Image (tube, helix red, strand yellow):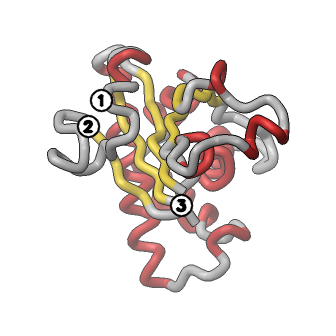
Amino acid sequence: MGFYGYYRAADREAALVRPEASRMIDEPHGVAGFDAVETKEIDPWGTLNKLVALIGDVDLSTELVGMVALYPPPEGAPQSEEEWDVLPEDSPYLDGPGIQGLSVNVRDLLTDVDDARLPALTERWAEIEEFSHFTSVDMEYLLSVAKNLVRLSRRAKEHDQLLYCWMCP
């Protein structure tokens, strides 16, 4: 289980300010000024992708999120087992954190969803395998996350920004 936070930024350069610091908390341990949504287990390639698939009314196995690895820089990633073996213990390639840029498609699907559909979509979302351990109390959390992600997406689109995911394993 990891920690995932979604935020908006004007561009990749802005999204990568102090990449090792959380976007969800202010100084001294985070980066002030990001409009962010904190989540627990809502990873972009699995659980968020399934919410977006439900919104888009497509098969849950459809990959809609479309991400670009931004940090640690993919061009510096180890290419062989030997290179992985010699990484220092504090290498971001071993322990994170990481930043992924999300596709405009994700932002737009979240932006355009009808608010009245969110409770029913969240009920269907809660039935996915990744949430099998959730209780009825967690339904309130999932609905809150869905609403917050939609609002964040709308603000991002309004300001001609994209969404990013800051994650820490």
Q: Are marks 3 and 1 in contact (CB under 8 Å)?
A: no
Please tell me which residue is depicted at 38% across the width and 15% down the height of the picture: 13
Q: Quadrant of residue 133?
A: bottom right
Question: Who's the residue at 39% across and 25% down the image?
Answer: 16
Closer to viewer: mark 2 or mark 3: 3
- Residue 52 visible at all: no
Q: Position of residue 112 (x, y in %)?
A: 47, 32
Q: Which mark is residue 2?
A: 3
Q: Which numbered disc covers residue 97?
A: none
Residue sitting nearer the eye, 166 or 136: 166
**The disc labelled 1 sits on which kind of residue?**
Arg
Residue 39: name its quadrant: bottom left
- Residue lying at 79% horizontally and 40% vertically, measured from the top left: 62
Q: Give the mark nearer the N terminus: 1 vs 2.
A: 2
Q: In the picture shown, does residue 15 fall above or below 19? A: above
The residue that appears at 46% across and 63% down in the rendered structure is: 40
Instruction: Give, as a three-letter code, the residue at label 3.
Output: Gly
The answer for how far apart the CA atoms under marks 2 and 3 are is 20 Å
Pointers 2 and 3 in contact (C-beta within 8 Å):
no
Q: Which residue is mark 2?
A: 35
- Label 1 environment density (alpha carbons within 10 Å; few <14, some 14–19, many ≥20): some
Separation (CA) of disc 3 from disc 1: 26 Å
159 relative to 82, above or below = above
Task: Tell me the SS state at disc 1.
Answer: helix
Q: Quadrant of the N terminus?
A: bottom right
Which residue is at the front of the view, 85 or 5? Answer: 85
Identify the residue position indicated by label 1 in the image.
155
Q: Nearer the viewer, mark 1 or mark 2?
A: 2
Task: Inspect the image, locate mark 2, and give the three-letter code of the amino acid beneath it.
Answer: Asp
The secondary element bearing badge 3 is classed as loop
Q: Who comes first in sequence, dot 2 or dot 3?
A: 3
**For the residues bearing labels 1 and 2, Cβ distance under 8 angstroms:** yes
